[in-house]
Image: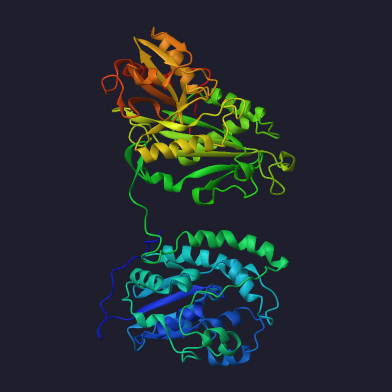
């Protein structure tokens, strides 16, 4: 979105066709300083709100101390303004028009699609708008209309439809704090050469000022350039609180489309070393436009990725007070869904959650989420149930009175090629310095979101260049990795640690039953680290990665350093399970 509307820089010459730059904003958005910046170029004729009289004529109830003088000085007829001002060639290569979005009411905007027209939407955080505007004592009231953010969203949509390229969105805070980088990015997007003359201007009134300048431009007239705002500790008026709530979604939408100042917020590197393997940070572009289910019982809804938030008062934020499951979708089926839901409810019951969603409600939320995203295969779901939103910041569950919060986060994430496990060549593990929590501390049978005990070993693995960290219990026996259960093969038999200090994984129990059906002996017992070092084969199990071979632990090769035959046999047998009828696997409805 930040590159939308990018045009090659124009080569300015006396024969070049003029470029008309139309800036649309709400009030108190540094729009006048922006106009002064363009005026300072010397090759740009600036027009200050040429549609103002048209706006006042369309809204006769608006009172302004300069209204009579303005109606005499400006044409109030929109088509006349379009013909005689907005589309009339200036004497300079550039023409800059400062507009307020609300002034387009009852306007035919077909003129805005001209090839010579460029459009800029200038936005500002509504909190800053409201606290800045509070000093304007002759404005009777402040409204959502006056803030103009809904009109800016509508205007952006309309111009995006009409014009060859969508408007360029600029955040006023970027202009104030990083003027040169922001102006360079803006000029580049408009196809106009940047000049450093845009960074400063003389103090005082300007020839382009509207006649209302004495009422509004005192601060602008003192300025000599963009400057980071001085520290301002302003209170929001209580009567403006609901207005701020109403305005923020519009601002957040446009903020997501704003250009990034050159050299600021540069794109992240294209790859990250994940589980020891270079991975793309954005392996599937479809995941940029996801819909996620969020909400309490009876009030959940689908939200775009950028808006899929929980409250700062939610228990997951306050104390990691939540439980979760990972699910996989294969060829129209949610594998072992009912088994995962049983464990989710067991975890919620162990945590004494109240007002928990019903199984049918969670299942329907999963169906709705998958259908909305068009997912029937190659998807992974992170299913989270928090204790819910609190009435006040506290760890005390007594303040949870709204019911649990359900989050259904589905992503395009097939095991092969996208998941963070190399199931073909195998991965390396390193033994963690941290010990796995015993049941007397935090019982791993509760599949909870408080994952510090797992994250710290993962950091160690990252620093060691390993896929994951092998964790030991307090007595020094192997428990699991920071993310998966673990198995070893010796002499044709499978060994796996007791589920005393590890999560009794659903993939783990599935593999144990599968191995027994294939005639492989399976033993649960305490297994030492030395036994794992001397194993014939090692693999991990989990919903995300299925069965992942381990070919090295602490720098030591496991077996012959390659994926073993027993692991391969289990991988092949496991791959067929999602297509089999099973009481715990749910077939998706048609969509």
From the viewer's side, name the closer residue of 228 and 12: 228
* Above or below 14: residue 312: above
From the viewer's side, name the closer residue of 194 and 529: 529
- The answer to whether residue 429 of the structure is visible from this angle is yes
Residue 159 left/right relative to 321: left
**Which residue: 45% across, 34% down?**
380
* Above or below 400: residue 245: below
**Which residue: 40% across, 80% down?**
199
Residue 61 image offset from top left, x and y in percent: 68, 80
* Above or below 214: residue 559: above
Q: Which image quadrant for residue 360? A: top right
Residue 477 image offset from top left, x and y in percent: 47, 21
From the viewer's side, name the closer residue of 245 and 505: 505
The residue at the far front in this view is 475
**Which residue: 65% across, 85% down?**
64
Residue 306 image offset from top left, x and y in percent: 50, 51
Residue 148 left/right relative to 79: right
From the viewer's side, name the closer residue of 577 and 373: 577
Residue 560 image offset from top left, x and y in percent: 26, 20
- The answer to whether residue 581 of the structure is visible from this angle is no
């Amino acid at each position: 979105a930040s590159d939308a509307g990018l045009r090659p820089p124009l080569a300015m010459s006396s024969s070049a066709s003029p470029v008309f730059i139309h800036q649309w904003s709400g009030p108190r958005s540094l729009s006048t300083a922006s106009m002064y910046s363009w005026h300072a170029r010397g090759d740009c004729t600036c027009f200050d709100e040429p549609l103002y009289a048209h706006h006042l004529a369309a809204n006769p109830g608006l009172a302004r101390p300069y209204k009579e003088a303005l109606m005499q000085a400006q044409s109030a007829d929109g088509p006349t303004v379009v013909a005689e001002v907005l589309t009339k060639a200036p004497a300079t290569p550039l023409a800059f028009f400062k507009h307020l979005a609300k002034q387009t009411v009852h306007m035919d905007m077909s003129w805005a699609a001209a090839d010579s027209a460029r459009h800029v939407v200038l936005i500002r955080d509504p909190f800053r708008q409201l606290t800045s505007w509070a000093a304007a004592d002759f404005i009777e009231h402040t409204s959502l209309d006056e803030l103009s953010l809904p009109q800016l969203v509508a205007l952006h949509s309309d111009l995006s439809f009409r014009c060859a390229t969508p408007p360029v969105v600029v955040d006023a805070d970027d202009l104030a704090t990083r003027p040169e980088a922001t102006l360079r990015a803006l000029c580049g997007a408009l196809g106009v050469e940047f000049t450093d003359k845009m960074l400063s201007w003389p103090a005082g009134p300007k020839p382009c000022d509207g006649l209302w300048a004495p009422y509004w431009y005192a601060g602008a007239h003192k300025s000599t350039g963009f400057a980071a705002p001085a520290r301002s500790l302003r209170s929001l008026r209580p009567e403006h609180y609901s207005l701020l709530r109403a305005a923020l979604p519009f601002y957040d939408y446009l903020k997501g489309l704003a250009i990034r100042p050159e050299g600021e917020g540069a794109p992240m590197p294209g790859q990250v070393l994940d589980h020891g393997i270079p991975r793309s940070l954005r392996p599937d572009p479809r995941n940029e436009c996801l819909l996620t289910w969020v909400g309490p019982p009876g009030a959940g809804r689908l939200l775009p990725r950028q808006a899929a938030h929980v409250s700062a008062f939610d228990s997951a934020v306050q104390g990691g007070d939540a439980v979760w499951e990972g699910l996989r979708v294969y060829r129209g089926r949610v594998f072992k869904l009912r088994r995962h839901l049983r464990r989710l409810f067991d975890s919620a019951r162990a945590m004494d959650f109240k007002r928990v969603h019903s199984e049918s409600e969670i299942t329907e939320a999963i169906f709705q989420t998958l259908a909305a995203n068009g997912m029937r295969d190659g998807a992974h779901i992170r299913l989270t149930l928090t204790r819910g939103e609190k009435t006040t910041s506290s760890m005390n569950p007594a303040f949870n009175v709204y019911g649990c919060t359900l989050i259904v986060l589905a992503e395009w994430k097939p095991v092969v090629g996208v998941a963070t496990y190399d199931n073909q060549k195998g991965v390396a593990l390193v033994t963690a310095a941290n010990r796995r929590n015993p049941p007397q501390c935090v019982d791993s049978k509760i599949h909870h979101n408080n994952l510090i005990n797992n994250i710290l070993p993962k950091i160690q693995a990252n620093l060691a260049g390993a896929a994951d960290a092998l964790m030991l219990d307090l007595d020094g026996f192997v428990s699991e990795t920071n993310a998966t259960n673990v198995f070893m093969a010796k002499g044709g038999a499978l060994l796996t640690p007791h589920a005393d200090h590890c999560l009794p994984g659903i993939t783990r129990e599935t593999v144990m039953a599968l191995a027994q059906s294939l005639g492989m002996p399976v033993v649960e017992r305490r297994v030492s680290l030395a036994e794992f070092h001397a194993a014939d084969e090692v693999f991990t199990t989990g919903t995300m990665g299925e069965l992942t071979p381990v070919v090295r632990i602490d720098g030591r090769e496991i077996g012959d350093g390659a994926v073993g035959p027993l692991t391969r046999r289990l991988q092949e047998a496991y791959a067929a399970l999602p297509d089999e009828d099973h009481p715990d696997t749910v077939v998706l409805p048609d969509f």
